[in-house]
Structure formats: C-alpha cells, structure tokens
Image (spheres, grey):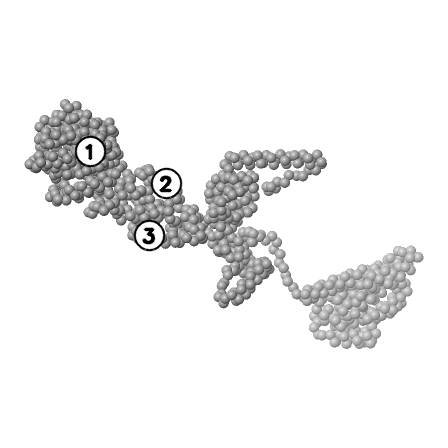
Amino acid sequence: MFRFQSLDDDCTLEEEDDGPIEEEDEIDQFNDDTFGAGAIDDDWQEEHKRLAELDERDGLGAGLGLGGGEMGGESNFRGGDLSSSTSLPPSSGQLPRPSLSFSSSSSGLPTQDADDQSGGSNLVESLARFILDADPAIAGVGAAERPIPPPGSAGPGLSALPGPDQHRVLPQPSSIPQKHQPQHQLPLGAPTSGLPPSSMLSYQQQQHLLRRGTAAVGQMNSHSIWENSMGFGPVSVTPGLVTHMENSPLMSIIKEVGLPKRPPQGRSDEGHDLSERVPPPRSSSPVIGSPPVRAVPIGTPPKHPMSLNHQIHHPTAVHVRAPVQHRYPAPFPERLSPNTLLNIANSPLCRGPFPPRVGPVLSQLQRAQLLNSQVAGFPRGGPLLAGGGFRPFFGGPPPPHGHRMGPPPPHGPLNHAPPVRHNTTHLHPQHRRMLTQRMQSRGGDRVRTGLDCRSRDPYSNLMSQKEKEWVTKIQMMQLQSTDPYLDDYYYQNYYEKMEKRQERERDSSSSKKEHTTKLITPQVAKVEHTYRPVQFAGSLGKLTVSSVNNPRKMIDAVVTTRSDDEEKREKQVWNKRRQILYTVEKMYSLLLEVQDFEKRFVQTPEEEREALLEQHKTNTEQLCSSLQEKDWEDRLDGWMDGWIWVDEWVVVEGFSASTAVISFLSHRVSDELCVMIMSVRKGKRLVARLLPFLPAAQAAAVVMVIARNLPALAKKDKQDQVLCCLVDPVSAVIQSLSSSALTDLLQELQGSEGQLTTVLQNKVNRRRQLVSQSVNT
Amino acid sequence: MNYVPGTASLIDDIDKKHLVLLRDGRTLIGYLRSIDQFANLVFHQTVERIHVGKKFGDIPRGIFIVRGENVVLLGEMDVDKPCDTILQQVSIEEILEEQRLQQQAKQETEKVKMQVLKDRGLSIPKADNLDEY
C-alpha cells in the first residue's frame, strides 16, 4: 500500500514536476531523491515567507492542515516519513490527483490570483472527490467542528467548499490505515488562519510543499514527537478546507512548512493549538513507526553499496561480505523478504540517477544477495572446508546471527544450518546461477549426496590426512614379515587364487587389463640389531641403557669355539699325562710296599710270612709289568699284593725268587712307558729306586732304554735335574751287565745324538768311564 | 579399502554414523570422528541407547572417547533406514525406569535360583562379567 502510495507520490511528483522542475531550484527532484522528502533544505524559510504572505490573505489554513494530515497518514516507509503527525486522521489511501486541485487551487495563489476564481469551481469538483475518500472520522470531525472561517480568509470558493463537501466526506470510509492514535480529533474547530489555501500558493511552491509535506506529514503522525513542534505556527484550517485539503499532499507540505508566525497567537484562543501538530522540518527522521534509526543519518550518501542495507536494517553495520577465514554466512541477505528487498530498492538511498519508473528494480548487489539466499540451501563446497580442521561453526555465527535476528523479526526462526557464503555476491547473477546449477548436478549422485552430507557436516575431516596415514602406517608395520608364506599363509594363498581367477575371467571376457588393488606387505629383511652401548671417548666404562631391545648383560660369558680335532688332541695329551702320573703314583706305592717289606716281614708272625711273601711276589710282578705293557694299570694293582712276598722271598732266598718272577714275566720293557715315566720327575726317582729291585735282565733293559733315550731325557730333565740320581743305580746295573749287553749299551750311547748338556756329558762320560772300566776289567 | 586393500581398517568409517557395543553392555550411537592404532574411538554427538524389550530410549551424551579394548563390536548405521519400524522410542525417564525394572526382575530370579540350588546342595559362583582381579 505504501508502495503504491509512494509510487503514486513519485509518479505524481514526476509528472507534475517535469515542467517546472528544471526551472525551480528549490524543487529538486534529484535532491529529493537523494535526501528524501524528509530532508529539507533551507528553502522552507522562503517558503514560509511566502506562505506567511499567503496566509494573510487566505484563512484556509485548516484545509491545508487537513490535507497535510491526510498525507501524513498515507506514507509510512518513505524516507520522507510521510506519516502524518497531525491530529487529523489520515484520509483514504486513494489519492486522487490532488495536484489537480492544487493546480487549480494554486490559481488562488497570489501569483495566479486571476485564475483563482475560475479555478475555484474546478477546485470544488476535485476537492469533492477527495472528500469522498475522506475518512469518516475526519468527515465526522469535520462536520462536527466546522471551523470558523478565519477572518480575511481568501478564496471564497474555498471557503464555500466545506459545506457541500463535508457531508460527502461523511459516508466515504477511509481505507488508509491510521497509523497514529485515533484519539487525535480533527481540530476543525481551530482552523488555521495563517495557512493560505492551497490555491494561494504557486504551483511550484505547492509541489515543493507537497513533497516536503509528504515527508513532514509523516512525521506529524507521531504525535508525541511533534507535540512540541516549534518554529511553525499551528496549522489552522477551516474544516472544509481541512477535509479536502487533507487529501492533498500540499496540505502536508503546508503543514510541514508551517503557517506564518502570526497564527499561533490567533489560534490559541481557538482552543486548539495546532502548533503541536506541526512538525518542524528536520533533516533526520527519528520517528516512531518508521524504520529503525540508522546510525548514519539519511542524508549521508552510502559509502559503498553495502552500507545501504546496513543502514536500513542494522543499526550496527555487519558486513555482508565476511572475511574469508570466518566462513560465516552473510548477515542477512537470505533473511530479506521480497518486500523488504523491494523496499531497499525503492528507498531513496538506492535510487540512482534512474528513478525506478518500471518498478522495484534491484541493484546489482541486491540481485546478488537474492541469489545468495537462493544458494543458501546449498551444500558447501569441499574446498571451503578443507582449510584444515574444525571450524566452530556454531561458535561463530551467533554474533552475526544476533544482528540478523534483530531487525527482521517476522522472518521466522533462524536456520542454523546455512552453508557458508561463497563470497559470490560480486558474481554476475548468471555466473552465480551456473555455479548453483553445477553444484546441483554434482549433488545428484547418491554417493555424492553422502559425501555431500559429510561435507556439509561441520565436524567432518577432524582427522587429517596425515593422521590417517600415520595410523595406516602403524597397521602396515604390524604386517611386516620376513617370510609372508610362513606368517600369513592363508592370506597369501587366498589372494593368489583370487588373482588367478580374475585373470581367467579377464582373459575370457576381454583383453583389458585391470589391476585389482592388492595389499603389498612390506618384506623386511631380518637384520640383527646389536646394541652398541654409547661410549664417550676418554671415559671409563660404557654407558649402558637397558631397554626391551637391549637387556642388561649380566654375565660376560665368552664362547670359545674350537674344532673337534684340536679338542681331541688336547684331551689326549692331558689324558696321557694324567695316566703317566697315575702310573707313577701307583708304582711308587708299590715300590714303597716292596721297600717296606723287610720291616713288615720281621714284624709279622711266622704263619703269615708266607702270605706276605706271596704278596711281595705279586707286587714285584706288577712292578715289572708296569714298565712293559700298556695295560699296566691292571697289573699294577695285582702287583701290589704280591710284592711284599716277593721281596721277602728275595731277602731270604736271595735274588732267585725275584729273578724267577722276572724271568717268568720276561716281558719287553716298553720304551714309551719308561720314557713317559721318566718324563715326570717323580718317575725318574721311581725308576732310580726301582732299578735295584728289578731283576737283572729287566734292569739292563731299563738301562738300555735310558741310554737309548738319554738325549730326550736329558732335555726334559733341564728343569728337574734329577738324572743324577739315576747314575748310581745305573752304574750298578752297568757293572752287572754282561759284555754283550755292554756293547749294546755302548752302541746306544754312541748312537745317541750328541746333544748333551755338560752335566749329562759328565754323566755320560762317567758312565762311559765306568763302562770302559767294566769292559776293561 | 582406501588405504590398505585387503585389510580391515577403520579409516573408511570415519565421519559415519556407527553403533558400538561396549564390554559393559552399553550401546552407543554416534559419528566416528577419529581412531588410532589401538582402535580407540572418538564419537561425536553420541547417544546412549537403552533397549528394554521392544522399547528404546536415547540419552544424548555428547562426545565420547572409547578405549579400544572395551569395544565388543562396531558397525556402521544406515542413516536413511528408519529405526522405529519394530522398536518404539520412548522418553528417557521411561526407558530408565524400564531398565531398572528389568534389572530388578533379573536379580530376583537370580536370587531365587541361587536359593534353590543351595537347597539342593549346589553352589554355582556368580559369573562376573567384568575383569577378574
């Protein structure tokens, strides 16, 4: 409705103003467009003067006041604040051409006084039409309080109007919504006296006033504000004039402009102080019922396209184009209803040099914003969210949402799931449409809708790619194996079978090669990781940190690896030596037994002497045989018993017994054994002590052995130096040797290698001497 | 199958609605947001669903972090399929009440059973579902 009105207003203005508009400096269409009808320049002063002059002549200010009131009721939104503040209730919304009447009435203006009378009748006609649409309340009021025609009221025609028009006013209901309180009664009883009838005003002035009035009368409506209107005299109009004048915008202008100063005094005695209802001209429009107060006054031109929206809807400017990283939706575009958008469009602020003749034309920006709202239901693009991580979606928007919620309350609850603004408001609408279409097509796939849903999910992709790869890497590590066929036999076989099957199928179907994804587990070579403890140069010891992979070394056990042969040889050597030692010990014990035989023999009683002798014998045997055979160990044990007996028997009966034993045995003395025994120090001593007990043949044989192995023995004897003990018994044996044996011995001695030590040489020499002596003898 | 073909991995289950059954018998439904190598799970917009007979009730819990060892099974939920074909959703208070009654009834039967067994000389130790210490 208001739109219609405003349109009408505009249209009327434009139509009417086309002619004189260029001429008139004051009436500036552009100015009005820019600043709004509410913005008044200083022309009002001139206008006031003019009106004051008119007012003197014409006392039909009441009519004008009425018209002004009507005008105020019509408009509400226009920046001009067309709501009327008069006490006169607005008349019908239908605005029959008031200008016509004004034009006719303007004839009544001083400049066109001549035409006044002629136009008066016409005026009556037109005004009647107005009155038909007039509010019944007004009409009623008008009828009730017929204003006393002010003295000297000009325009008898006009003054005559109230009569016939008034009753016509009555039946016609008003369709204009009354914005202000209906309490305001039409103070027709107090006709404005100062206000000249519209006829008195010049055409241009009328228009000007009209326009001004449309703005100012709007202000008039808010009675409370305009209670204390100042500057202007009260508008006093005759009831008739009021009724018909209220339809005319001119009335509003006049009202707004105010009547000359004179009327206030005159009016006061009428009981009605219409000065309260006259709005002072203001450049800003802080009127209740009009759009919310803007932080910036109406008059300031918008800095950039955005600000107009802000000015209209937001007291605190929230930029539509949010910074990219916030990804907040634009504060309000989608909240705009088409109406509000059109209001924006039609607001004087956005009216550029091309007035919206055609209709509500959205500027580029508004179109973009409209489209943006269409896009509002769309899923966010992936890349918008991919910017790393989680955006606290609900944490952010509340502040801008709050702003949004404020101004357009009728727009319903906020939808908290709007996707991010693509900052595409700067895009060409065509481009934008293409984008949305593309997005739509992409979202058609079921899977993609799933993905879409996920991409729409503000909490998605909390786990970044890197983290996913990290987890996968750990899982892969667990699959590492040196021998996959050992660790994962069934898996390997299964996949082999599957691949074979697929190959068969593939070959049968087509030659196209398809590679199915196969898990390739990494094969890690088994590497022995030895722990090398950290060592610092110059420090004592090793710094060892024990861990699972490097347990602490408790025992420093060294494993020596040896081959079997070496081990055997070593064992043999040791065994042999041990054997020799053992043999020597045994023999020694035997020998001692033999040597102790005499004592024992004496001590033992007579009957047991024979047993003792027997024992002696066996001992001797054993001794002898120990030198001879390999398996002497067994024999030695046997000898122990018989030795004592043999010894005693020898003692008693001489050597015969022992020699018999020995001859019985007459075994070859083994060289090796002797040498072995002789290698041991104790063995040498043993032999030295044994020699006298051995039978002659044995003794000789032993001597021969010694002579034969003398160098070796001498060598071994370097440490021990016990060969000397052998000399005496050996010499004794040599002496008893037969010549043939001696010869052999000599041969042996000569045959021996000449590696003898001086001591041995002495010995040998001595032996040689002995031998030679014996030979000589 | 995304990253590691031929294996089972939870990577592909991320950001999907899941149902998980825990070792203590709880059933959680939520969006799986994050995992790790132990299958510890992070659930978002979690709802604990209590089932008693044919009725169920949802208790919103918010964000849940489940230690991997406590998971019995985990499965993706079909968001499109309606969940109230056979089951009937009730309010939280009601389902808690139902659960309490159910627990009570169970305990009573258990007690009676134990008593009967005791009378006959048999004593079966009560099996503890939780870990034995």
User: Which numbered tag is attached to residue A433?
Assistant: 3
Residue with the mark numbered 2: A414
Residue A44, horizontal then vertical, whole percent: 13, 36
Q: Give amino acid for label 2.
A: Leu
* Residue A532, position as x, y percentages in the image: 54, 57
Q: Residue furthest right?
A: A607
Q: Is residue A667 above or below residue B129?
A: below
Specify which label sits upstream in the sequence, 2 or 3.
Answer: 2
Cα distance in 3D space between marks 2 and 3 = 25 Å
Of badges 3 and 1, nearer the viewer stands: 1
Residue A152: name its quadrant: top left
| Chain letter for the residue marked with disc 1 in the picture | A
Q: Sequence order check: which comes first, mark 1 or mark 2?
A: 1
Q: Position of residue A87 (x, y in %)?
A: 21, 29
Q: Which amino acid is tagged 3? A: Arg
Quadrant housing residue A196: top left
Viewer-proximal residue, A363 or B99?
A363
Disc number placed over residue A263 in the picture, else none: none
Co-location on one chain, circles 3 and 1: yes
Looking at the picture, which amino acid does disc 1 mark?
Leu
Closer to the eye: label 1 or 2 = 1
Tell me, yes or no, whether the two marked residues, 2 and 3, touch with CB atoms within 8 Å.
no
Residue A690 in view (yes/no): no
At 21% from the left and 46% from the top, the residue drawn is: A357
Q: Secondary structure at mark 1?
A: helix
Point out the image quarter for the C terminus of chain A: bottom right
Q: Check disc 3 and report its element: helix, strand or loop.
A: helix
Q: Is residue A268 left or right of residue A460?
A: left
- In this view, B52 is above or below A582: above
Q: Residue at x 54, y 56 (%)?
A: A479
